[in-house]
Amino acid sequence: MPLVGLLVIIQIAFAIHVVKTGREIYWIFIIVFIPIIGISLYFFTQILPELGQSRTANKAKNSLLKAIDPKRELRKKKQQLELANTLENKIKLADECLEAGMTEDAIELYQASLKGVGEGDPDILVKLAHAYFKNRDFELTIKTLDDVIKQNPN
């Protein structure tokens, strides 16, 4: 008997959702006259795809993927760098290395990014200082931040 009550509450909630979101009225009949199948159909065809487009759902999905395969993004960024050795790809890989606790690799990539086009870039220098800090190299952290201030007095 309590299951029937729960089913009725779910049917009412889904029927309200149909009306509030402006879905076709036939969904109410499907939900009411074919309860379990109707609720399941409505959930999987109407609600779930809508949930998948929200920012919260994307964050949850990314967190779940990271928990299942923590090195996935790192591999992806390495492949992108191998495909196109650009400043942007170096920085993205360095960021990912830093997040994965690979501070030495991140430092090397940030230093390589400061050559050529990225020379003196304050954003890269700040990221490099952060990597030095995470690596417990406080002298280089201070020196790098001082360089940022010297090059960008504003």
Image: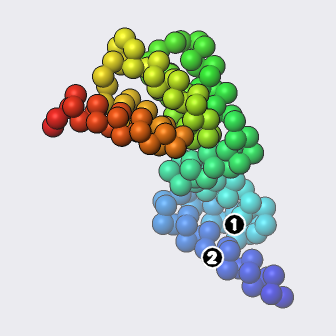
Q: Residue type at mark 1?
A: Ile
Question: Label 2: few (<14), some or many (≥20) within 10 Å?
Answer: some
Residue 92, image x and y in percent?
50, 29
At which x and y percent is residue 124? 38, 29
Dots 2, 1 in contact, CB < 8 A:
no
Q: Secondary structure at mark 1?
A: helix
Residue 89 drawn above or below residue 147:
above
Q: The residue under label 2 is which amino acid type? A: Ile
Label 1, on which residue? 31
Q: Quadrant of the C terminus?
A: top left
Q: Residue at x 36, y 19 (%)?
A: 118
Q: What residue sits 80% from the left and 87% below the top?
A: 2
User: Callout 1: few (<14), some (14-19), or many (20+) C-alpha neighbours within 10 Å?
Assistant: many
Q: Residue furthest right?
A: 1
Give the mark nearest the N terminus, 2 or 1: 2
Check the image and name the residue furthest to the bottom: 1
Q: Is residue 53 visible?
A: yes
Can residue 96 be seen?
Answer: no
Counting from the top left corner in percent of width and height, residue 16 is at: 55, 71
Above or below 76: residue 18: below
Left or right of 70, for residue 107: left
Q: Position of 117 compared to 101: left or right?
A: left
Q: Residue at x 71, y 64 (%)?
A: 39
The spot of residue 93 in percent (x, y) is: 55, 27
Q: What residue sits right under mark 2 in the picture?
A: 12
Instruction: Give the quadrant of the N terminus.
Output: bottom right
Which residue occupies the extreme left position in the image?
154
